[in-house]
Image (cartoon, grey):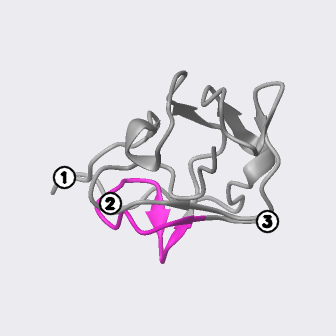
């Protein structure tokens, strides 16, 4: 139940796994993946390295605002695995 992240330019991405802890996915009226976004995304810069911790993020750690997503249950993600997109930090697991 990890949160997989292909946004290699995100501070919380460590070898393709999210280590942000709790994250937020927005897209209240989203009907497609491109209408969602991981608002926890923080771009890396040269002065910061990847955020590392001993705890990786799971789908149950996601506060989901994508109200039309089949995996949204009362604001919590129920997907067994979630993928965040590299190009725009959208939720590729979104299903309407």
Give the total number of marks visible in the rendering: 3
Q: Residue at horizontal 70%, vertical 63%? A: 54
Q: CA distance from mark 2 to mark 3?
A: 25 Å
Residue labelled with disc 2: 49
18 horizontally vs 88: left or right: right
Q: Residue at horizontal 27%, vertical 59%? A: 87
Picture coordinates of residue 7 (x, y %)? 36, 62
Q: Secondary structure at mark 2?
A: loop
Q: Secondary structure at mark 1?
A: loop
- Give the extent of the magenta segment: 4-17
Between discs 2 and 3, the one toward the N terminus: 3
Point out the residue furthest to the bottom here.
Answer: 15
Of 27 and 45, the residue lying toward us: 27
9 horizontally vs 55: left or right: left
Of 80 and 94, the residue lying toward us: 94
| Residue 45 tag number | 1
Picture coordinates of residue 1 (x, y %)? 79, 65
Picture coordinates of residue 71 (x, y %)? 76, 45
| Residue 1 tag number | 3
Tags 2 and 3 in contact by the CB under 8 Å rule?
no
Between discs 1 and 3, the one toward the N terminus: 3
Q: CA distance from mark 1 to mark 2?
A: 8 Å
Residue density around tag 2, few if under 14, some if 14–19, many if 20 or more, within 10 Å = few
Is 9 colored magenta in this rendering? Answer: yes
Residue density around tag 1, few if under 14, some if 14–19, many if 20 or more, within 10 Å = few
Q: Main secondary structure of the magenta part?
A: loop
The quadrant where residue 72 appears = top right
Picture coordinates of residue 36 (x, y %)? 46, 38
43 horizontally vs 17: left or right: left
Q: Residue at horizontal 74%, vertical 51%? A: 59
């Amino acid at each position: 139940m990890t949160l997989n992240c292909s946004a290699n330019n995100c501070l919380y991405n460590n070898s393709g796994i999210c280590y942000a802890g709790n994250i937020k996915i927005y897209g209240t009226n989203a009907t497609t993946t491109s209408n969602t976004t991981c608002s926890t995304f923080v771009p890396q810069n040269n002065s910061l390295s990847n955020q590392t911790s001993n705890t990786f993020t799971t789908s149950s750690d996601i506060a989901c605002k994508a109200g039309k997503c089949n995996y949204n249950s009362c604001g919590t993600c129920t997907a067994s695995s979630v993928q965040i997109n590299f190009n725009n930090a959208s939720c590729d697991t979104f299903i309407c």
